[in-house]
Amino acid sequence: MEDIKKQQIVNTLRSYCERYESQAKASNSLKNVSASTVSQMLNGKWELIKDDMWRNVAAQIGYKDEKWNAVATRDFTTLTRILSDVQDNALVMAVTGDAGSGKTFALRQYTNAHKQVYLLCCNEYWTRTTFLGEMLMAMGRDASGLGVNEMMAEAVRYLKMQERPLLILDEADKLSDKVLYFFISLYNALEGECGLLMVATGHLELRIRRGVKASKKGYAEIWSRLGRKCVALKGVSAADITAVCEANGVSDPRDIDIVISDSESDLRRVRRKIHAILKGKLAVGSCSVGS
C-alpha cells in the first residue's frame, strides 16, 4: 500500500479517535485492532503494520479510497436535521426510508462528525449477547467476561455519563424480537438522558403495527415509546439524481434522463448507471484516439 494512502487513513483515524474520550477507547471500538497498532499508525511507525491491517482499520473508521462525490440529497438533509434534534433533546424516534435512499450514508456522516454518537448496523443473526457486545464496542468499552445483565448495566451506566449521547440502531427491522425488546429497556433506563433513533425500511412500521394488532409481547410498548409514529423519508427525487450525476461527471441532460429513468429512485442503481455511462464514454474516446 502506498504511503500517501496510509497517510490518508491516518488522517481519518485521527478524526475517528477525536470522537472518543481517549485513544484507548477509540482502539477498543475497533475489531481485531490493538491499541499499540493504533498508536503506531498515528505516530508514523508503519514498518511492521501489514496491508491487511491497514485495510481492516480503513474499513472500520469510514475511510474510502474512491473517486465519488457525495451529494446532500433532500433525505440526507432531513435525516441530518432529525439526528441533531434527537441528540440535542434526548428524543426517541424511528425513521423509515426506502432501500437505496442513502440512509446509512447519512448516519455514518453524522456519526463521524459528532462526539458521543454510537451507530450500530444491525444484523438478523445477532443474539442478545452480540447486540450488547456490539453496542459496548461502539462505545469503546470492553465487554469481555461480562454476562447479558452486566453488559446492559455497563452500557446504561456509560451512556448516563455522557453529555448528549445518541444511540442509533440502523436497519433495526433486522433484529429478532428478543433483541428488539432491548429498545424498551434502553428507553426505560435512559429516558430524557440519551437520544435513541431506530432507522429502517418501511417494513419496521409494518412489523410493529402487526405486532400491536396481534397483541404480540412488547410491541405495544415499543410503539408507544416511539410516539405511535415512524417518520417517513420522501425518497430520492429527480433533482437529487441530477445533482449526483453532475457532481460525478455526467452533465449531458440526455444521459441524466437515462439515469433517472433507470434508477427506480435507488442511489445504488444511480451510481452503477453513472459508472456505465462514464465507462462507455471513455471507451468511445479511446477508440477515437486509436482510429
Image: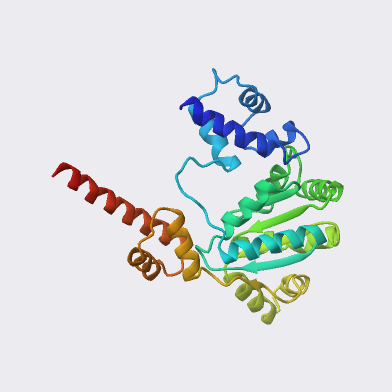
Q: Residue at x 24, y 48 (%)?
A: 285
Position of 187 with respect to 96 (left or right) is right
- Which corner quadrant holds the C terminus? top left
Of residues 54 and 112, the one nearer the viewer is: 112
Q: Is residue 124 visible?
A: no
Which residue is most to the left? 291
Which residue is most to the bottom? 213
Count every numbered label the image shows and give the total: 0
**Image height of 197 relative to 12, above or below:** below
Of residues 101 and 251, the one nearer the viewer is: 251
Residue 239: give x, y in percent of width and height.
49, 68
Q: Residue at x 54, y 17 (%)?
A: 47
**Image height of 36 relative to 129, above or below:** above
Residue 211: give x, y in percent of width and height.
66, 76
Residue 78: give x, y in percent of width and height.
64, 65
Q: Colour mode?
A: rainbow
Q: Residue at x 19, y 43 (%)?
A: 289
- Quadrant of the rendered structure where residue 216 is? bottom right
Residue 25: give x, y in percent of width and height.
74, 36
- Quadrant of the rendered structure where residue 184 is? bottom right
Q: Residue at x 77, y 57 (%)?
A: 87
Of residues 68 and 58, the one nearer the viewer is: 68
Q: Is residue 167 visible?
A: yes
